Amino acid sequence: MNEQKLSKRLASVAHYVRKNDRVADIGSDHAYLPAWLVLNQQIEYAVAGEVVEGPYQAALKLVKQRKLDQYITVRLGDGLDAIVTDDDISAITIAGMGGSLISDILERGHQSGRLNGKERLILQPNVGEKTLRTWLMNHSYEIIAETLVMEDGRFYEIIVAEKVAKTVKYSLADLTFGVFLRTGYPDLFKEKWQADLLNRKRVLKQLEQARQPQLEKIAEMTHMIKLIEAL
Ligand code: SAM
């Protein structure tokens, strides 16, 4: 992957960026996503935010090499601290992290006022999708689209959400399996949850065979297995 050819996963994230959005890509690493968006004339302004020095330097280097300085501002910062009011951000992309870390970044942005509710959120959690959907629901974000992709043998979900002026309510099944994924990607969806089910059954066996079985974890795992089987 590079700024000219995105991975399938990041291309799916890019798909939901609207033309001329002002994008904040948080956890940007090499800044491949904002660079691709600019090079493909989708956007003219982006902030590439990074909290770690190495990936921050990698993003700076790419932006300089491709002479994208006037379009992409690279900032070292934790989560949404990388953006300022004048950026006038209209879309936030956060990809390649766990759902709880993404939720934590959004929560801190919400608390600090850097997340103002006008931004479209385009999120790609590697794990912890339920945690992320729950955060979105609890903060009145409606999930407007979802994509499921498989890349290098791994499944990835992309969740797109926008803030609405009403209470958002999702069922446990929506939060766990997605609002659109069950019907949108029948084969891939089935494959994902069949693999997940096998994995959970293996973990359950290990939990049950442990010298001191953790009853709470066993009950949680059994509940999830039943939920997936019912699906
Ligand atoms: N977004 C790219 C992608 O999807 O290919 C890079 C994903 S990489 C696995 C995750 C990146 O997020 C790392 O470069 C890490 O330094 C950065 N990161 C983790 N926590 C962060 C935070 N709180 N604020 C900004 N960046 C963060």
Image (spheres, helix red, strand yellow):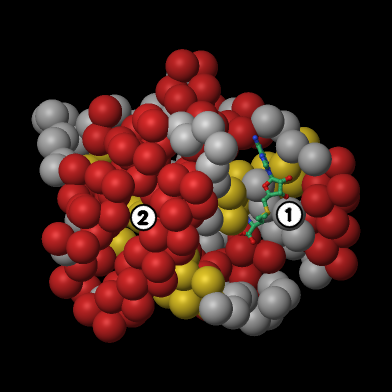
Q: The disc labelled 1 sits on which kind of residue?
A: Asp
The residue at the point 54 percent across, 42 percent down is: 210
Does the beta carbon of the residue at mark 1 sit less than 8 Å from ligand 1? Answer: yes
Residue 107 screen position, x and y as percent: 46, 25
Residue 138: image tag: none
Does the beta carbon of the residue at mark 2 sit less than 8 Å from ligand 1? Answer: no
Left or right of 224, for residue 14: right
Q: Residue furthest top?
A: 111
Residue 144 screen position, x and y as percent: 23, 54
The residue at the point 41 percent across, 57 percent down is: 200
Residue 2 screen position, x and y as percent: 72, 75
218 up-or-down from 48: above or below: above
33 up-or-down from 174: above or below: below
| Quadrant location, the C terminus | bottom left
Q: The disc labelled 2 sits on which kind of residue?
A: Ile
Closer to us: 178 or 116: 178
Mark 1 Cα-neighbour bin, 10 Å: few <14, some 14–19, many ≥20: many
N-term mark: 2 or 1: 1
Closer to us: 103 or 51: 103
Closer to us: 79 or 3: 79
Q: Residue at label 2?
A: 159
For the residue labelled by badge 2, is the local secondary structure a helix, a strand or a loop? Answer: strand
The residue at the point 25 percent across, 45 percent down is: 223
Residue 46 screen position, x and y as percent: 60, 51
Closer to us: 100 or 214: 214
Whether residue 194 is visible: yes
Quadrant hosting residue 133 = top left
Left or right of 126, for residue 4: right
Residue 29: image tag: 1
Left or right of 160, for residue 41: right
Count of numbered circles in the view = 2
Tell me how far mark 2 sits from mark 1, CA to CA.
20 Å
